[in-house]
Amino acid sequence: MDRDESLIIWGGVILIVGLAVLLFFAALKDEKDWAAYREAHHCHVTGSISSSNGWGFGTKGEMVSTYIPGKTLWLCDGGEIIGRSN
């Protein structure tokens, strides 16, 4: 393996690790923002929707498997209902 190939491989590794770290901190911020919103608007759990797998059809008519993630339903001030993925 020459120097150019090594630089390309290490550049790819650094890019992937950097994106993983960025996604981690974005998820952390989203959770903090949701906690603050939940407190400010006095939200409480009212129910949940379980996740499900199924079959559907793609844009070209081919059969595809589908996954719908479960959600927790929150009722906030003013009657607003928010569904958050589990």
Image (cartoon, rainbow, N blue to C red):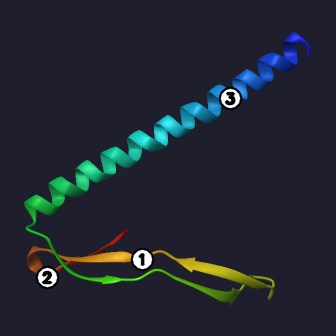
Q: Residue at x 39, y 48 (%)?
A: 27
State the image coordinates of residue 47 (x, y, percent, origin top left).
25, 84
State the image coordinates of residue 76 (x, y, percent, origin top left).
14, 74
Q: Name the outermost residue toward the top.
A: 3
Q: CA distance from mark 2 to mark 3?
A: 47 Å
Q: For mark 2, what is the residue?
A: 79
Task: Name the amino acid type tagged 3.
Answer: Val
- Judged left or right of residue 79, residue 51 is right
Rendered image: mark on residue 41? none
Q: Describe the element under mark 1 as helix, strand or loop.
A: loop
Task: Name the amino acid type tagged 1.
Answer: Gly
Q: For mark 3, what is the residue?
A: 13
Question: In front: mark 2 or mark 3?
Answer: 3
Q: Classify 84 as above or below 47.
A: above
Quadrant (top left, top right, bottom left, bottom right) of the C terminus: bottom left
Q: Name the outermost residue toward the right.
A: 1
For label 1, the crowd category at 10 Å Cα-Cα, with few meaning under 14, some 14 to 19 and many 20 or more, is some
Q: Residue at x 16, y 62 (%)?
A: 38
Rendered image: mark on residue 70? 1
Mark 3 and mark 1 lie on one chain; the one further toward the N terminus is 3
Quadrant (top left, top right, bottom left, bottom right) of the N terminus: top right
- Judged left or right of residue 41, residue 30 is right
Q: Are marks 1 and 2 in contact (CB under 8 Å)?
A: no
